[in-house]
Image (cartoon, rainbow, N blue to C red):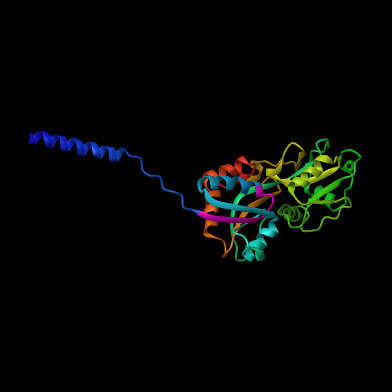
């Protein structure tokens, strides 16, 4: 009898141990909380929105306020301490970079677009500069139809405008008579799509079938030509933080540079840095 009771005790003990080992572990609750604010490049806005959705699916107690305004706005906001993460779609000057931590998350390409009905397929950088400086005013001078050229550009706070002025105009101010200035990349694309004589530049991630992309110096803008630097109009997409940015900002940037974040960069049409 005593032996039977001992055996039963051992059986119950082992059963209890087995039940304990088989019990699922209690998941660790995500305790990351806070509100992240963004300001800067309109080009980067859709990228941040996508990364933000993914980040908040993991960290459900985090909220985000994503504003734009252009790269200059983002740089100023970081210097002023009024936003957590600034967005810039161009390289910063030495003065701008003072006191700012920079994290490049993607490579963007400035694509030159014309109306789909325009037969022009290629321009040189020199021809492009002459168009925006008002030296070439008719597509006929470039082998196209007898049609006035209407250059479209972004406003001065835009990173796309800063990159174009630096890379194409050599920091001169466009002076074509029929020049149109738009607030966003979408506005610029819409202007070109609706005007047979227009030409404009948009970020690589903003390209769609409403306009026709032309080659520059014979090179088409693609991820491959961006990586090997053969396409002449490429620029960095940068997150910026400053002394007053929350620690949560770094957590978000780390996600953007992770394998998952970089996959989203590529899926949205930009060139990942990793």
Nearer the observer, 200 or 120: 200
Prevailing secondary structure of the magenta residues = strand
Tell whether position 44 is magenta: yes
Nearer the observer, 133 or 161: 161
Task: Give the image location of residue 14, x and y in percent.
Answer: 21, 37
Nearer the observer, 50 or 256: 50
Q: Is residue 235 above or below residue 14?
A: below
In magenta, the rendered stretch is 33-45
Residue 152 horizontal side relative to residue 262, left or right? right
Nearer the observer, 49 or 233: 49
For this orientation, the residue located farthest to the right is: 146
Task: Give the image location of residue 7, x and y in percent.
Answer: 14, 35
Residue 270 horizontal side relative to residue 212, left or right? left
Tell whether position 16 is magenta: no
Locate residue 191: give its quadrant: top right
What residue is shown at x 86% (from left), y 42% (from top)?
A: 197
């Amino acid at each position: 009898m005593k032996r039977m009771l001992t055996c039963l005790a051992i059986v119950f003990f082992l059963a209890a141990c087995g039940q304990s080992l088989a019990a699922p572990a209690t998941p660790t609750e995500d305790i990351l909380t806070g509100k992240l604010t963004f300001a800067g490049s309109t080009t980067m806005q859709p990228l941040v929105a996508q990364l933000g959705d993914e980040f908040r699916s993991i960290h459900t107690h985090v909220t985000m306020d994503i504003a734009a305004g252009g790269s200059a706005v983002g740089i100023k906001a970081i210097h002023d301490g009024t936003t957590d993460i600034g967005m810039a779609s161009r390289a910063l000057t030495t003065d701008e970079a003072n006191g700012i931590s920079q994290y490049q998350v993607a490579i963007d390409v400035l694509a030159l677009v014309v109306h789909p009905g325009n037969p022009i397929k290629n321009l040189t950088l020199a021809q492009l500069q002459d168009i925006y400086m008002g030296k070439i005013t008719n597509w006929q001078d470039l082998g196209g139809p007898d049609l006035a050229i209407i250059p479209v550009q972004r406003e001065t706070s835009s990173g796309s405008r800063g990159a174009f002025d630096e890379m194409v105009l050599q920091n001169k101010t466009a002076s074509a008579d029929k020049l149109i200035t738009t607030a966003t990349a979408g506005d610029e694309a819409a202007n070109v799509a609706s005007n047979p004589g227009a030409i404009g530049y948009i970020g690589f991630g903003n390209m769609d079938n409403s306009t026709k992309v032309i080659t520059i110096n014979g090179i088409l803008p693609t991820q491959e030509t961006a990586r090997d630097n053969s396409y002449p109009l490429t620029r960095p997409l940068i997150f910026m933080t400053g002394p007053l940015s929350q620690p949560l900002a770094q957590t978000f940037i780390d996600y953007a540079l992770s394998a998952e974040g970089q996959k989203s960069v590529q899926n949205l049409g930009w060139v990942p840095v990793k």
